[in-house]
Amino acid sequence: MVRALIGLNMARQELGAVLAPEVELLHDAVRDTEEALAGVREVTDALCPGALRAGGLPAALAALARRHPGRLTVSGTLRGRLPLLVETHAYLLVAEAVERALEHGGAARVQVTADLGPSLLLAVVDDGAPPVTAADLAALSALTERAASLAGTLTVRHTPGTGTTLTATVPLGPTDGP
């Protein structure tokens, strides 16, 4: 797609400022290709953000917090890298839980904690509404399956007046640590 965009831009430059219907079509093709490429980059970054590829789960969680300033904080003892499969699923689990809390649960604040011991412990605590809608329950089911795919567990607890806590525990083998 990038190669096509470069070719279209080169063709546009060669044609210059000619005002013909064909040149307008070329301009439209360049715009549409730029938009499609931006969409591909957005999807790719959502599935495996650059921060995750470059710095692991701690960097990806910090980048997620920067996208929600004042609403999302991240803490914990996790430093360094984990196996890519664990990092990817753990990031997606947290990102989906944060989205549920902020977008569907109406949370004003979310706290993510990532602690590393014999297992990876992820907690997402929000001050929003409980997960009770069909969409919430489907999202929680998907998160439970994501944790299970790593031989882990997911628990959900809602305390009225306080909020919801999602806790994922992912066991790490003796050679799977950072």
Image: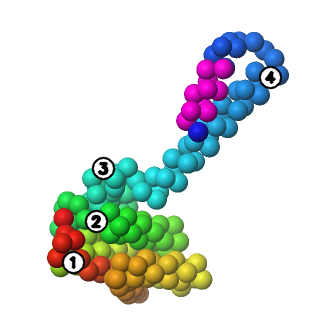
Quarter of the image holding residue 20? top right
Residue 41 located left or right of residue 118: right
Q: Residue at x 40, y 79 (%)?
A: 149
- Along the polypeptide, which appears first: circle 2 or circle 4? 4
Residue 167 located left or right of residue 6: left
Amino acid type at mark 3: Ala
**x, y percent for residue 48:** 42, 57
**x, y percent for residue 152:** 33, 82
- Along the polypeptide, which appears first: circle 1 or circle 4? 4
Q: Residue at x 66, y 31 (%)?
A: 30
Give the main secondary structure of the magenta stretch. helix
Distance between mark 2 and mark 3 Cα atoms: 13 Å
- Along the polypeptide, which appears first: circle 2 or circle 3? 3
Along the viewing direction, whichever of 87 and 7 lies nearer the viewer = 7
> Badge 4 local density, few (<14 within 10 Å), some, or many (20+)?
few
Amino acid type at mark 1: Gly
> Which part of the image, by quadrant, shows the C terminus?
bottom left
**x, y percent for residue 19:** 78, 15
Along the viewing direction, whichever of 54 and 173 lies nearer the viewer = 173
Q: How many marks?
A: 4
| Residue designated by label 2 | 83
Secondary structure at numbered mark 3: helix
